Amino acid sequence: MGMKIDRRLTILGVMLVVLSMTMATQYATTKVSYTYSIVHPSNADIRFIGSDNGSDGRVLRALNNGTVASVQLYFGNWSANSNKTYTAAFGIVNEELMNVNIAHINISTTTGADYMQIWLHSNRSTNAIDDGTKTYIWNKGPLGYTSSANCAWRLGAGNQNVSNMCADGITQLTTPWDTTKSVRYSVNNANASVNATSDFVWVQISIDIPAAADQTGTHNGTVWIHFKAN
């Protein structure tokens, strides 16, 4: 009689274990939607605008203008033992509703040597060397700027409006469309304020070509701009 009771208890225990496992195995389905747009680089949340002119129009211009447009910096033709400086080769504008840091900039060459020097600075029409608010960020190879804080320049919060940029948190400066080179641009001389007040900064680029320059052909590559959220 005792053995029968034990078996029943054992069977009941097994049933309880199976039942508890069945109840614990639960599945649920849920979903979340997402959205983003692929836009022209002059209309993005962190966007590039033109300013200085080169030999045939704005230094910054669009390639493959349309749904997959990209932008390029075109510097033209220069001789050895010369220097050409564009104090506002292009501008970087933040449209995010938060501060954005430019961590650093570097160059990767595709063909030819790297003779480029790059500054971030406030005054569009002044050589960055004479601009009190500047960051020397690239010098023909090595980083011109390093920091444990990983912030070469802090852009102020934008307003999600690609038709303007802001110098002081109040004053809106228009960034109209250049129909020839298919980019937005600005030639306004209002300075970019420091301390993350302005949502834009000017990028000065010098092509500093030595006397013994590499003259084997076209010099081209990519300018890498690294951003970091504040």
Image (cartoon, grey):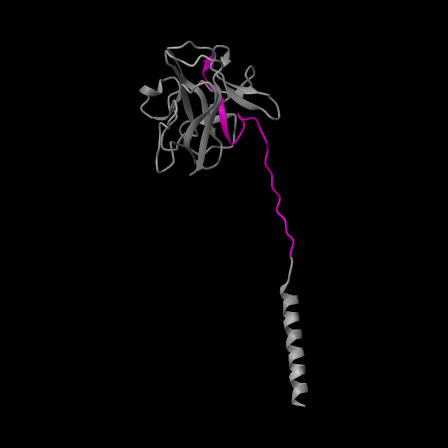
Quadrant assignment, res 121: top left
Tell me if residue 169 comes above or below residue 34 in the rendering: above
Q: Position of residue 122 (x, y in %)?
A: 37, 24
**Which is nearer the eye, 65 or 49?**
65
Q: Where is residue 71 in the image (x, y as percent from the top left)?
A: 53, 22
Picture quarter with the N terminus: bottom right
Q: Can residue 172 be seen?
A: no
**Which is nearer the eye, 75 or 186?**
75
Q: What range is drawn magenta here?
A: 28-54
**Which is nearer the eye, 133 or 70?**
70
Picture quarter with the C terminus: top left
Residue furthest to the bottom in view is: 1
- Residue 227 belongs to magenta span: no
**Which is nearer the eye, 164 or 125?**
125
Quadrant assignment, res 151: top left
- Residue 37 belongs to magenta span: yes
Residue located 54% across and 26% down the image: 41
User: How many numbered marks does the figure carry?
Assistant: 0
Q: In this view, does 187 lie to the left or right of 147?
A: right
Q: Position of residue 135 (x, y in %)?
A: 35, 27
Q: Position of residue 120 (x, y in %)?
A: 39, 25
Q: Can residue 79 be seen?
A: yes
Which SS does the magenta portion mostly show? loop
Q: Is residue 210 left or right of residue 41?
A: left
Residue located 67% across and 82% down the image: 7
Residue located 40% across and 10% down the image: 80
